[in-house]
Amino acid sequence: MNSLLTGTKRIYGETLILLKLLATLNFASLRRLLRVNSLFEKKLIVQNFSNMRDMFFHVDMTVATGEPLPLVAAPQAIPDKFTFRQKVFDTAEWVDARSLTAIVVLKDAKLVHEAYFRGTSPDDLRISWSMAKSLLSAAIGVAVREKKITNLDAQIVDFVPSLKQSAYNGVTIKNVLQMASGVYFNEDYLDYNSDINRMGRVLALGGSMDEFAASLKNRDWEPGSRTHYVSIDTHVLGMVLRATTGQSADEYVAKKILEPMKLEANPYYLTDGFGVAFVLGGMNMCTRDYARFGLMFAQNGMLNGQQIVPKSWIKASSAASAPPPIEELDGTDDGTLGYGYQWWVAPNPRAGEFFAHGIYGQFIYVNQSQNVVIATNAADLDFTEGDGRVTLEHIAFFREIADRLK
């Protein structure tokens, strides 16, 4: 009887511990979801964008050595005005309207201008959003050089068989590099029920991004026929990178890209609940380090005397090689944005001009012909205004800077 009572108490105690643990886990998930739901609130967005590790699972990356690539200061003023579509913008007013939090300008590999706004500082590790796609593209380029990936026309499912029952069956590596998978994906950030926002909730609640990708079953177009921006395509690229290198994406990016760059601060990736890096938008770095990444591309993959990314990959990834875009990305008076391998190309581009771009105003602008790199971070809640107009305003601003620098 005593042993039965003791056993009953033990089971009851263990059950109570388990229930408390489950309650804690559920509370943690609920808290994350609540914080993510307030991620873009006007009063919180600037602070949130510099403190993403407080809201999401993440993996810290130890790559900085304390001896960063020097950015020698050679101060120059940037233009106080610029023109876009025959309208003259006051730079200070535009910076405020677009909610910039940081700008770093390099000319001839020297730091010519740097400014921080809205209470932020140079030390803030800021969310990349989709600029991370361009970083992953660089890692794919290294994997090609190392012959981990030997054919961009190879089928995704040859490396990731878990996607055979998904819309990615029949899609090539090159298709996803060019955002031409044809997979149906609603990228409307303002629609709570869109695929992009469903994916965000999977991330916040600790679900599996791999499973989310495998759950996509429908196509809009045949692979390779049209360009349609589908963020999950980049996650699929990350799945290929993991399969071909035998390493996690964050490990490979750290070893092959970030360590050789000599960053000044240790970055981190957001992850899903299984520790898989959110490679399509989850990098967090200081703005100077985003500029260093742009500088490496401006110098055709060279930095610190090392050929970090193959020159041939820089040329291929920054060229507007993707198929024609769907109508929603086409038809402006200014021309059509081009797309390469996870890099954007401006309408009527200048020689060697391309850019990485993340929502809410994140940019790495590269202008090889004028030896200019501009990195900006922002918390612009109105980034969707004008069906692409805001992006084109940024390009006009960046070009004005490039033209005025000596």
Image (cartoon, rainbow, N blue to C red):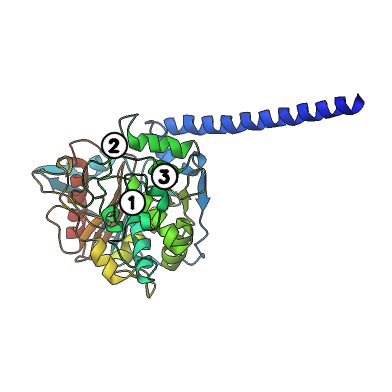
Does label 2 or label 3 sit earlier along the sequence?
3
Q: Which residue is mark 1?
A: 131
Which one is closest to the eye, mark 3 or mark 1?
1
Q: CA distance from mark 2 to mark 1?
A: 19 Å
Q: Is residue 132 visible?
A: no
- Residue at 37 percent across and 58 percent down: it is 158
- Residue at 77 percent across and 29 percent down: it is 11
Q: Which residue is mark 2?
A: 186
From the top left corner, tell me how far across and down residue 265 is, in percent: 47, 57
Does label 2 or label 1 sit earlier along the sequence?
1
**At numbered mark 3, what does the secondary structure look like: helix, strand or loop?**
loop
Farthest residue, direction bottom: 305
Question: Of the numbered discs in the image, which one, if any, rests on residue 120?
Answer: 3
Q: Quadrant of residue 104?
A: bottom left
From the top left corner, tell me how far across and down residue 200 is, in percent: 40, 37
Farthest residue, direction front: 165
The amino acid pointed to by label 2 is: Asn
Question: Of the numbered discs in the image, which one, if any, rests on residue 59?
Answer: none
- Residue at 50 percent across and 34 percent down: it is 32
The amino acid pointed to by label 3 is: Thr
The amino acid pointed to by label 1 is: Met
Q: Quadrant of the C terminus?
A: bottom left
The answer to whether residue 390 is left or right of residue 168 is left
